[in-house]
Image: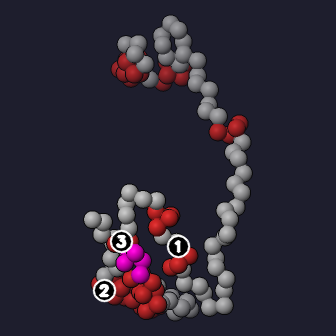
Amino acid sequence: MYQPLRITKGFQERQVEIADTLQENFETQRFQSPITRRVGKQISKIEKKLSKLKLNKNFDKQINIEDYLIPEPGAQSSLPTQAPQTPQPNPAVVTPPVQPAVAAQSGLTPTEEALLSPSEKAIRLRQRGLG
């Protein structure tokens, strides 16, 4: 049976410690633990739902994320109703680079021929099935 990760009391306490440390070090900023009472209740609801999750079924049909979002006071939902249109990549950018010509005589490229030691050349030829 699937057991979701639980937010422990120790984790919540550590979040408060981190917020307090940040507040001490950055006096001009306002920090507080992200785990408020309201967030804790929502996390508990999510944990309960996840513990009943059927792993052989479609996740999106079992859980509606909107049911668990906490709206900011006076704000609309921050999730877009439809995903933005993503432009297609330029084929010239994603086309693999042309491999350098391999000299038929040696089986190595001119760069490999110039830079590799004899033992490295042997390794390269073995990798290509020529050695």
Q: Quadrant of the C terminus?
A: top left
Q: Which residue is mark 1?
A: 65
Please, which residue is most extreme toward the top here? Answer: 105
Mark 1 or mark 3: whose residue is earlier in sequence: 3
Marks 1/3: CA distance?
Answer: 15 Å
Q: Position of residue 8 (x, y in %)?
A: 31, 82
For the record, the magenta segment spans 45-49
Quick one: 84 or 104, which is closer to the camera? 84
Q: Position of residue 124 (x, y in %)?
A: 41, 21
Is 96 colored magenta in this rendering?
A: no
Q: Is residue 124 above or below residue 8?
A: above
Marks 3/2: CA distance?
Answer: 22 Å
**Tag 1's secondary structure?**
helix
Q: Evaluate whether residue 41 shows in this view.
A: yes
Q: Mark 3, residues whose alpha carbon is within 10 Å: few (<14), some, or many (≥20)?
A: few
Q: In the image, what residue type sits under mark 1?
A: Ile
Q: Which residue is mark 3?
A: 52
Q: Which residue is mark 2?
A: 9
Residue at 38%, 67% in the rendered image: 53
